[in-house]
Amino acid sequence: MAKALFELNPDLDRAALAEEFARERRLQVPQVLTDETARELRMVMQHHTEWGIALQAGATGEPRNFRPAELKDPQKQRQAMEMGQQTDQAAARGDYAYRALRYSLVEGLQSGWDPDSPYAVLLEHLNAEPFLGFMRTITGMPDLVKADAHASCFASQHFLGRHNDSHVAEGWRIAYVLNLTIDNWHPDWGGYLVFYDEDGNVETGFKPEFNTLNLFAVPQDHAVTYVPPFAPKGRYAINGWLRDR
């Protein structure tokens, strides 16, 4: 393992980043981590993660996360396949839906999925002063007190439908995506974080570039675009929300 699993790039221009975030309320931070730690995290995601499948069909539908052990059960396999079909149906009628590979850092820690997992160490880093202090500085939100997180992989035929993260009552202030994707992600492979105006036009889109942190104030209408069947597996990220409670 690397000497550190998570280390911020010491050369980041925090004042310039804060100025851009104040103006746009969304931001990309290239080379946010040291190269060594970013590559170590990607290696963990590629080779040391027991991915489940996360699905939701419809805005009022129940979100499900099928763990790998569950999917050994034929009945659970059928349920996951049926839910996958339902996500297509929901998306086809313009309703909210998503499907992607997922590993919850918080649930994994609380449920003891893997007591020696590096994800427990990563969660500590995300809630330690170096990262939280950095986020307070560039967002201008001094009341950010904690971060939650899950690992995600958008592979072939995965997507996250348009929504706005309107969980302000739960303390959500900032949504973040730490991209750890494979090198040279091609635009034709989808997986872009896109933002919409009131008419459904795309205002801007963020490429899933390796070692780039995307963040934005919530609520904002956004989505992750569909990953086509020919795309390689590799749109890895650590996602979550920064909270004020």
Image (cartoon, helix red, strand yellow):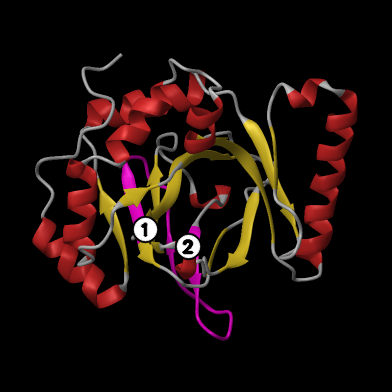
Estimate the x, y position of residue 183 in percent, counting from the top left: 40, 35
Q: Mark 2 packing: few (<14 Cα in 10 Å), some, or many (20+)?
A: few
Task: Answer with left or right where residue 67 lies relative to residue 176.
Answer: right
Please report contact status of discs 1 and 2: CB closer than 8 Å, yes or no. yes
Instruction: Verify whether residue 140 appears in magenta.
Output: no
Q: Mark 1 packing: few (<14 Cα in 10 Å), some, or many (20+)?
A: few
Estimate the x, y position of residue 201 in percent, counting from the top left: 54, 79
Identify the residue shown where x is 58% and y is 79%. Answer: 200
Label 1's element?
A: loop
Identify the residue shown where x is 80% and y is 55%. Answer: 88
Kind of residue sitting beneath label 2: Glu
- Tag of residue 123: none
Identify the residue shown where x is 59% and y is 23%. Answer: 50
Location of residue 22 by image quarter: bottom left
Instruction: Verify whether residue 195 appears in magenta.
Output: yes
User: Farthest residue in the bottom direction?
Assistant: 199
Magenta-colored span:
193-215
Identify the residue shown where x is 42% and y is 69%. Answer: 218
User: Which of 233 and 71 lies nearest the eye of the viewer?
Assistant: 71
Estimate the x, y position of residue 190 in percent, counting from the top left: 56, 52
**Quadrant occupied by the N terminus:** top left
Would you name the residue on which mark 1 appears? 245
Kind of residue sitting beneath label 1: Arg
Would you name the residue on which mark 2 appears? 170
